[in-house]
Structure formats: structure tokens, C-alpha cells
Image: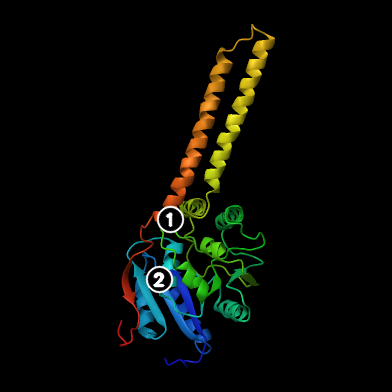
């Protein structure tokens, strides 16, 4: 398929997991809808899916070698790590991240791209009047939204949808982050406040069930807590300081009572006072040490985000 070189370039990054039934039709529809208007690039990243996703993705590469790139990860690393792999392999002027389950119909991809190209935002998020997620997924999204608002200073009216369009300079900045456990939205919010949003439709899953689990929700929350904010450590320090002040007030009360009433029993009160004092000092010390350890961990941990086991992409010579 020959594409005119003067068309704007667009990359669609799709993390694939249990998408054997949907990823093939999705690629066909994306090419049919966006191929005539853009120098389209579709980057498929198979996150070690246990179904036949790898076979289907390979077939799509063989059918559209000029458009489709396919990378199969050696082990399951989670959505955000898989997306980072796709971003590193993308080259478009704009990069759209979308799921493989058809909850974001192809017509809305076109709407998102048109809106993004017509404005000067660094990133455009989508939002929905009615989300078709499961109740558990909605609860998880709500909690994640609250955490991001507190920890990352996310605007309260911004929904952190996984379906978004990112301008190339911001993509280039995001992929400079090489530490483990990346959080794409955290990297975006840390880099820019030039953020747009557009209303799109949200459909039921075409097939199967969501891979969003309690374990993944906890893992994502811990990533936000430990990778992008030292607020929890400062909270621990604050609690330690509060306990110290409380113990000091209690100790003063005990001393005053003793002066007023020399017969006032001090045994249990004194023991409680010293327990509170020591606990407060320990929490302050742990909070201060944790502040440094947390910063060192974020900056120095170099565990790979992903490992690409198989690559399928056209080179200059036309071979994969």
C-alpha cells in the first residue's frame, strides 16, 4: 500500500492483551478509515497475551507491512509498560493510544485526531458522558482519579482516559523516562499543563472481559505513590511530628498534675508518655530517611520496563 509522503503522519499505539478476536478487525478498520488521510503507522505491542493475539498481530503485519509494526514482549509487564514500548517504536507527528477492545470506536479515533491537529495542545484526553466500564472498573477509575488529583495535582475536571492523542515533542520527552513502573499520565502531568479534552462515545466491550483487576489497581496506585510523589513520606513525617507534639502536651499535663497533686499516680502515664515520644521520634526519623531513599529509588532504579522478544517491522531494505 503506497501512501503519499505529503500527508501528515499519525501513529496508533495499541497494547494487546487477550485481543485475538478484536485486534484484526480493529487494524482493518483503522487502515480503512485513516489510511487515506494520513501516513498511518499502527504499532501493536503484544503484552505476552495467553490467547492467539500474537498470531493475529503477525498476520496483520504480513498483510500491511508498510503500515503495521508488531512487537511481542517476552513477559507480561502491564499496560503502561507495554504502551512505553509502543511509544518508543512510534514515529508519528501525533501518537494516539487506544485499547484493543472497540470500546473506543474507530470513528472516535478520527474525531480525536481531527481535534488534536486543530489545536495547539501537547496532549488531548478523551472523556465520556456515560462510561460502559464494569462497576469495579468505574470504582477503580474513581480512586485513581482522586489519587492523581492529590498526588500529581491533576486538574479536577480532567479525566485520565487511556484513549488520548499526544504530540511528538511530548512523546519524545516521555520516552526519556527509563525507570521501571512507568505511569504515562503521571509523566504527562509532570511535563505539561497544556492539556485539551474532547467528548467521545464509549461503547461496551466487543468481546471478553476486562483485564482490570484488584491487583493491577493496587499496583497502579503504588506506582503513583512511590514514583511521582514524596507526599506519603511527608505524611509519615507529619504524623511523627503530630505524635511528638501530642506526647509533649501529655507530658506537660502529667507534670502540672504532679505539682498540683503530689499524690497523683505517674506510673502508667509516664510509660504511655515515653511510648508516644519514642514512636513520634521514630516516625520522624523514618520519614526523613524515607524521603531520601524514595528519591534515590525513583532516580537510580534501572530495572527494564520491558523486553521485546520478537519484532516485526519493515526496514529500509523491506525486510523485517
Q: Compared to 242, does 71 lie above or below?
A: below
| Residue at the spot 63% in from the left edge and 16% down from the top edge | 255
| Residue at the spot 58% in from the left edge and 35% down from the top edge | 241
Q: Look at mark 2 in the image and give the residue it sits on.
A: 45
| Residue at the spot 44% in from the left edge and 79% down from the top edge | 91
Residue that extends furthest to the right in the rendered view of this protein: 260
Q: Quadrant of the N terminus?
A: bottom left
| Residue at the spot 61% in from the left edge and 57% down from the top edge | 153
The image shows a total of numbered marks equal to 2
Q: Compared to 113, does 229 lie above or below?
A: above
Comes first in the chain, label 1 or label 2: 2
| Nearer the camera: disc 1 or disc 2 | 1
Residue 17 in view (yes/no): no
The x and y percentages for residue 93 are 51, 80
- Alpha carbon of mark 1 to alpha carbon of mark 2: how far? 27 Å
Q: Are marks 1 and 2 in contact (CB under 8 Å)?
A: no
Task: Left or right? Give the position of 173 relative to 319.
Answer: right
Residue 227 in view (yes/no): yes
Name the one closer to the observer, 155 or 48. Answer: 155
Q: Which mark is residue 207?
A: none
Few, some or many residues within 10 Å of mark 1 (<14, 14–19, 20+)? few
Residue that extends furthest to the top in the rendered view of this protein: 263
Q: Which mark is residue 299?
A: 1
Task: Left or right? Give the position of 261 relative to 65.
Answer: right
Q: Secondary structure at mark 1?
A: helix
The answer to which image quadrant residue 63 occupies is bottom left
Amino acid at each position: 500500500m503506497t501512501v503519499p509522503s505529503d500527508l501528515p503522519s499519525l501513529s496508533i499505539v495499541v497494547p494487546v492483551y487477550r485481543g485475538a478476536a478484536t485486534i484484526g478487525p480493529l487494524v482493518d478498520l483503522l487502515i480503512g478509515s485513516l489510511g487515506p488521510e494520513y501516513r498511518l503507522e499502527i504499532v501493536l505491542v503484544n503484552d505476552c497475551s495467553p490467547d492467539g493475539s500474537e498470531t493475529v498481530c503477525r498476520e496483520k503485519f504480513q498483510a500491511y507491512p508498510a503500515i503495521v509494526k508488531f512487537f511481542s514482549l517476552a513477559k507480561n509487564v502491564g499496560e503502561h509498560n507495554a504502551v512505553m514500548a509502543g511509544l518508543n517504536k512510534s514515529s508519528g507527528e501525533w501518537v494516539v493510544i487506544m485499547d484493543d477492545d472497540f470500546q473506543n470506536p474507530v470513528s472516535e479515533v478520527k474525531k480525536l485526531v481531527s481535534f488534536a491537529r486543530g489545536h495547539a495542545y501537547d496532549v488531548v484526553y478523551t472523556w465520556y458522558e456515560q462510561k460502559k466500564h464494569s462497576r469495579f472498573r468505574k470504582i477503580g477509575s474513581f480512586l485513581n482519579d482522586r489519587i492523581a488529583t492529590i498526588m500529581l495535582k491533576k486538574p479536577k475536571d480532567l479525566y485520565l482516559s487511556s484513549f488520548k492523542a499526544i504530540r511528538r515533542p511530548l512523546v519524545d520527552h516521555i520516552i526519556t523516562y527509563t525507570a521501571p513502573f512507568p505511569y504515562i499520565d503521571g509523566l504527562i502531568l509532570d511535563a505539561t499543563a497544556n492539556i485539551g479534552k474532547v467528548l467521545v462515545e464509549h461503547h461496551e466491550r466487543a468481546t471478553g472481559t476486562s483485564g482490570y483487576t484488584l491487583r493491577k489497581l493496587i499496583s497502579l496506585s503504588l506506582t503513583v505513590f512511590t514514583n511521582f510523589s514524596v507526599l506519603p513520606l511527608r505524611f509519615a513525617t507529619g504524623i511523627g511530628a503530630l505524635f511528638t507534639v501530642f506526647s509533649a502536651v501529655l507530658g506537660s499535663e502529667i507534670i502540672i498534675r504532679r505539682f498540683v497533686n503530689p499524690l497523683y499516680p505517674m506510673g502508667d502515664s509516664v510509660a504511655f508518655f515515653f511510648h508516644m515520644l519514642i514512636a513520634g521520634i521514630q516516625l520522624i526519623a523514618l520519614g526523613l530517611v524515607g524521603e531520601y531513599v524514595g528519591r534515590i529509588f525513583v532516580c537510580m532504579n534501572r530495572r527494564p520496563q520491558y523486553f521485546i522478544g520478537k519484532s516485526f517491522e519493515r526496514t529500509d531494505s523491506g525486510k523485517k
